[in-house]
Amino acid sequence: MKTLMVQGTTSDAGKSTLVAGLCRVFARKNFNVAPFKPQNMALNSAVTPCGGEIGRAQALQAMAANVALDTDFNPILLKPNSDTGAQVIIHGKVISNMEAAKYHDYKKVAMEAVLQSHGRLINAYDMIMVEGAGSPAEINLRENDIANMGFATQVNCPVIIIADIDKGGVFAHLVGTLMLLSEKEQALVKGFVINRFRGDIGLLQSGLDWLEERTGKPVLGVLPYLHSLNLDAEDAVAMDNVLDDKQVSVAVLLLPHISNHTDFDVLRLHPNVDLRYVRHTQSIGNVDLIIIPGSKNVISDFTFLQSQTWSAEIKRHLRYGGKVLGVCGGLQMLGKSISDPLGVESSVLHITTLGLADFTTQLSVEKTLTQVSGTCKLDGNDVAIAGYEIHCGQSHGPAMARPFLYFSAHPDGTEQDGFICDDNQIAGTYLHGLFDNTEAAFAILRWASEGQLDNEMFDLNKHRETQLERLADVCEQYLDITKITAITRGE
């Protein structure tokens, strides 16, 4: 056996982070290691080199393992588009939209895809680090489970359970989770990890001893609370970056179905950029740049935008010389209308949008998924860009005659993307990850602030690498890596 699964007592217990840390630890030990998450539900995703879609957490874990992105790392991706439904993506490609009840019945088919991916990874890698989803003790989700113990029992892999002590009740979480598992499932659990501990470890020792005696399972480590650990979020929107000493101020509209908000991590981490997410009922306020982000249900989210004061505030912002950038779904909202004749995202077939640029958008079943590069022309300068596209539908109209960027090479031969208005105030692009390129991010922020930003840009890739190394150092210091290695090998 060379597969190890990390399950959690709750959502946000630290599964994604622990898997990323272990991937980097074993990669540093020269193991060829791959991340794996059988089923992921998230609106943040990444595009693989072959044009498939996987969860953002698995993309981060692949970076930690120093391996190229692969759709087998996340064979089932669910992207919620309503309170009860989601787009179902298998092996990187959209299958259909399904309501929760229908997908529950579909899980037997989905499990086959999961096992196919795992089988290919077993043949290609020395170790597989698997991330569970939510908690394995959700009684109502146990039948046909493919995300937690359902997968673990299928492949007979060892399991580590992680719990977050910072929220309190850590011993109840661990013991309760274990007791709600079947005897066969309990036998697969090889130990516990406690996450986000603060204080004197000596004061915790009596509890650790009790836990091991009560369950017969070892505590494999107690990870400290890592202040200022900034890694790509799987789904939850990261905190704002509100500064007193700022050079550029940016507001991102927090739409109900916001997707790929990791696009703006660079801005959140920049020491001179004041970034905030404008939440329900909040005013946009006085800023240099308003960003309308991507959306998994663009018609529904535009209806939400209209229900706020945001539409009027955007127009007022433009009258006073402010800049507006639409990304993917946000681009679509800037045009005259969006049509969804096939009901790809919702039952609303047509909606009139902001009308700030002369184009219309029609959604389609076929999804564009690709990694791209090229140049962006801002203020007369050509700036190198790179990113990825994840969108349904196309936008057409006179505004597109003045594109925001030009592709150096595109898989389907497309030469340009998006638009920038004649008055230089409004721009839109389908490209995600635009700010990850330091040169492009600097140019866009200079455009937004009329040149106020100093010649300095935050390097997200360098920062991510530093954070992964820090995480791996902590894992090596506080976890019993020797025992975890033996568990993974079935020893």
Image (cartoon, rainbow, N blue to C red):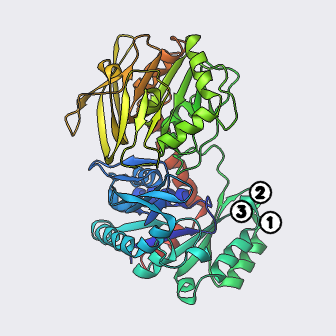
Marked residue nearer the N-terminal end (3 or 2):
3
For label 3, the residue is: 165
SS at mark 3?
helix
Look at the picture and state if 327 lies above or below 215: above
- Amino acid found under the numbered disc labelled 2: Gly
Q: Is residue 473 left or right of residue 400?
A: right
Q: How many marks?
A: 3
Q: Give how far across and how far down residue 387 sits, in percent.
A: 36, 36
- Amino acid found under the numbered disc labelled 1: Leu
In front: 105, or 51?
Answer: 105
Distance from disc 1 to disc 2, alpha carbons, whole Å, reads 8 Å
SS at mark 1?
helix
Q: Contact, CB < 8 Å: mark 3 with mark 2?
A: no
Q: Is residue 2 visible in this depiction of the protein?
A: yes
Q: Residues within 10 Å of mark 2 (few under 14, many from 20)?
A: few
For label 1, the residue is: 203
Which marked residue is nearer to the observer: mark 3 or mark 2?
Answer: 3
Instruction: Locate the C terminus by quadrant.
Output: bottom left
Q: Is residue 181 left or right of residue 90?
A: right
- Amino acid found under the numbered disc labelled 3: Ile
Q: Give how far across and how far down residue 222 sits, in percent.
A: 65, 64
Query: Which residue lies at the image location 70% right of the left edge and 84% below the top edge?
Result: 213
Q: Contact, CB < 8 Å: mark 1 with mark 2?
A: yes
For label 2, the residue is: 199
Query: Which residue lies at the image location 46% right of the left edge and 49% below the top edge?
Result: 347
Query: Which residue lies at the image location 50% right of the left edge and 38% below the top edge?
Result: 463
Marked residue nearer the N-terminal end (1 or 3):
3
Which marked residue is nearer to the observer: mark 1 or mark 3?
Answer: 3
